Image (cartoon, rainbow, N blue to C red):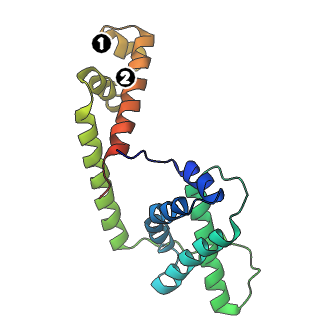
Amino acid sequence: MERRHTDIELWNAFKAGDDAAFENLFNKFYRLLYQYGSKFCSDKEVLEDCIQNLFLELWQSKSQAPVVSVKVYFLKAIKYKIYRAISNNKNGNKDLPLPDDLAFEFSHESFIVAREENKEHLDRLVTCLQQLPNRQREIIYLKIYKDLGYEEVAELMQINYQAARNLLYQAIKNLKEHFNSLPVH
């Protein structure tokens, strides 16, 4: 099984010259950028051009600026690119500040897509939960779904406080590993 790289690992590999990391970043974030960008821009050609330009400029500059969150970096960049494209089409002024009120639209289709994505994530989560050992499933249910405190969980499961904390930590760690190992549809 191939190890999944974190966003920051991909970003750093790209900055170091790894072409495959750049391709992975593009493939990983294109759909998110398109969906987010479509909330600001209904012109699909302009939106696709903005995404392509973002990645082209990124490729050409290989910015050395530190990035804390690759996802946030891309979302801010595409919003900026869309705003600039819209501003240039309206009045040719490239130096306008980015407004707080840039139109953000929800369409019926966006809710349908989001609902489908949420259902897919939920199905993946249920599959992963079923792969956990019984005690780990139980502690996730009690702590997360029933919102019990560690003291209550420890008493109910007949373990000490620290054992409850450790068990939940291990359960969440295993859940993440299972979730990340499932193929995305």
Q: Answer above or below: position of 116 versus 128.
A: below
- Give the quarter of the image for residue 62: bottom right
**Which residue position holds label 1?**
156
Q: Answer above or below: position of 20 versus 88.
A: above
Please state which amino acid type lies under the numbered disc 2.
Leu
**Whole-percent x, y for residue 25 in the image:** 51, 61
Residue 43 in view in this figure:
no
Q: Considering the image in quadrants, where does the C terminus appear?
A: bottom left
Asked whether the residues under the numbered discs 1 and 2 touch, taking CB atoms below 8 Å apart as contact, a structural biologist would say yes
Q: Nearer the viewer, residue 53 or 136?
A: 53
The answer to whether residue 120 is left or right of residue 58 is left
In the image, what residue occupies the spot 27% across and 29% down? Answer: 132
The answer to whether residue 61 is left or right of residue 19 is right
**Whole-percent x, y for residue 52 in the image:** 54, 77
- Give the quarter of the image for residue 111: bottom left
Q: Nearer the viewer, residue 73 or 112?
A: 73
**Whole-percent x, y for residue 181 in the image:** 34, 44
Q: Residues within 10 Å of mark 1 (few under 14, many from 20)?
A: few
SS category of the residue bearing label 1: helix
Checking the image for residue 25, the label placed there is none
> Which is more N-terminal, label 2 or label 1?
2
In the image, what residue occupies the spot 57% across and 48% down? Answer: 9
**Whole-percent x, y for residue 107 in the image:** 39, 73
The answer to whether residue 123 is left or right of residue 150 is left
Please state which amino acid type lies under the numbered disc 1.
Leu
Q: Nearer the viewer, residue 72 or 29?
A: 29
In the image, what residue occupies the spot 67% across and 88% down? Answer: 88
User: What separation in Å lies between label 1 and label 2 (alpha carbons)?
Assistant: 10 Å
**Which residue position holds label 2?**
148
Q: Answer above or below: position of 72 versus 89.
A: above
Q: Considering the image in quadrants, where does the N terminus appear?
A: top left
